[in-house]
Amino acid sequence: MYDIAPNSLKLSWENALSFESSYVAQNYYGGVDEKGNRNQINQVTKTQTLSLVVPRYDEYLEIDNFLITNLGQPIIFNGALYCCESFKWTCQNMQVFTLELSLVQVFRPDVTDRDKLKIKYFPLTFIADFKAARQYNYGTLTDTLTTPNGTYPGNNAFYGGVLLTDNRVFCIPFKSTTARVYNPTTNTLTTPSGTYPGNDAFAGGVLLPDGRVFCIPYNSTTARIYNTTPDTLTIPNGTYPGGQSFYGGVLLPDGRVFCVPFRSTTARIYDPTTNTLTTPSGTYPGNAAFAGGVLMLDGRVFCVPHNSTTARIYDPLANTVITPTGTYPGNNAFIGGVLLPDGRVFCVPFNSTTARIYDPFTNTLITSNTTYSGSGAFVSGVLLPNGRVFLIPFNSTTARIYNPISDTLITPSGTYEGSGAFAGGVLIADGRVFTVPHNSTTARLYGSAISPNLPMGRTHSAYDNKL
């Protein structure tokens, strides 16, 4: 299994060498669609031109060194296997660099010994270098809590949020029949087009590769997709079970959406490219088993245990489900998870008074030394710019910040309403945390804006930008 970045298609040598006459979909971010015979060498010469903001000079050097080192070698870029023949930088100023790449797309490199060919993953995708951006410390936010402009419906209105490509926040409708979009730049709240079912319709959402928002069906038997340009709402193909079936979703490395089973005993995967819904392999416990999922660094999905006493990991490449090591408390223990900078998964305590951290590298589960209030305290969390975890207060009247390096917990400034006030949070471009109103009629913003804005790879990553 190769080390991958989200939004890059994970290819194994078995797939690359043995696709035979099967369809090889490579239209992700402007690739191509091909059919080929076994061991056929398929090549498409194309030029990729990227305009990217490089916030740090050392990041530019890292990319430049990567290209120099791997010139003429196979790399994964935009979901396909390429060889980089040449590249050129154009510097417009000290922050904006234009990179022009000459790439040859190769599905089956002419190499007989796969072990001699070391595949590397190009550290740039449509939304920048995910892993480097997540591991970099962009500084600590000022410990302050503010109430932004705008009034929300309350009454379990929204559940989870997604940061749009224009850096506004989209609130996922739960009981509300309309969505809300908060603009942190202008500090304004708007109601976008479209009517939603209400009745606990959706729980969480993900940002699709094309910038649209996919709403995860909870009670609804159909999904919804919101498009910012134009301001429209559509119902994609596919029928869901309803009855609290799914709780949160994850954008898979190939651009599909994995719906995390809550009461459903099977998962669902929506493909926005083909507008189709499928049921992947694997059986889940049902009975409010999992609440939220986390995309791990190897491209697999960790399902966060809620009532289940064991986790599940879905592998989209093998289309298999496994039960990793470790026993969880059950009894609505956790809701949502956060991928830590070191690749471990932090499970956010809801009813549990202790956190759990799963290590996919060693397949081990540990109990953090920190203590939480339980009683529906927190719903999901946000990875702060400094690599710590901000826990979103649901019934709790105070937030918590977990430090994964020291395994310690602090209570930041500010008082929240409790009583199911907020459900999920979003890291916005200026580094502040937006708490999504559930029962509350106002949102909250934790921290003071930092400058410059965080890179898109930090804020829009498939690891983080979801519930």
Image (tube, grey):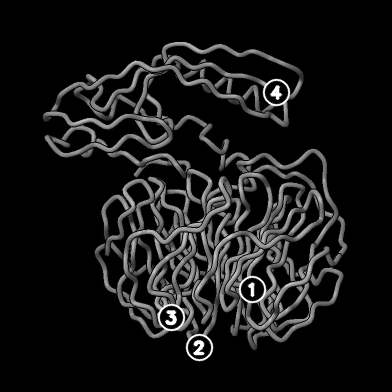
Secondary structure type for disc 2: loop
- Say which residue label 3 marks: 244
Question: Earlier along the polypeptide chain: callout 4 or callout 2?
Answer: 4
Q: Is 129 on the left-hand or right-hand side of 362?
A: right
Amino acid type, callout 4: Val
Amino acid type, callout 1: Ala
Q: Position of residue 79 (x, y in %)?
A: 39, 36
Alpha carbons under labels 4 and 1: distance apart: 36 Å
Alpha carbons under labels 4 and 2: distance apart: 50 Å
> In the drawing, what numbered circle is on residue 331?
2
User: Image point 60% across, 14% down: which residue?
Assistant: 89
Question: Earlier along the polypeptide chain: callout 3 or callout 4?
Answer: 4
Instruction: Name the image quarter holding residue 290.
Output: bottom left
Relative to 406, does residue 165 appear above or below in the rendering?
above
Tell me if I can see residue 151 in this picture. Answer: yes
Question: Earlier along the polypeptide chain: callout 4 or callout 1?
Answer: 4
- Say which residue label 1 marks: 423
Query: As rendered, which of 210 and 177 lies closer to the eye?
Result: 177
Label 4 packing within 10 angstroms: few (<14), some (14-19), many (20+): some
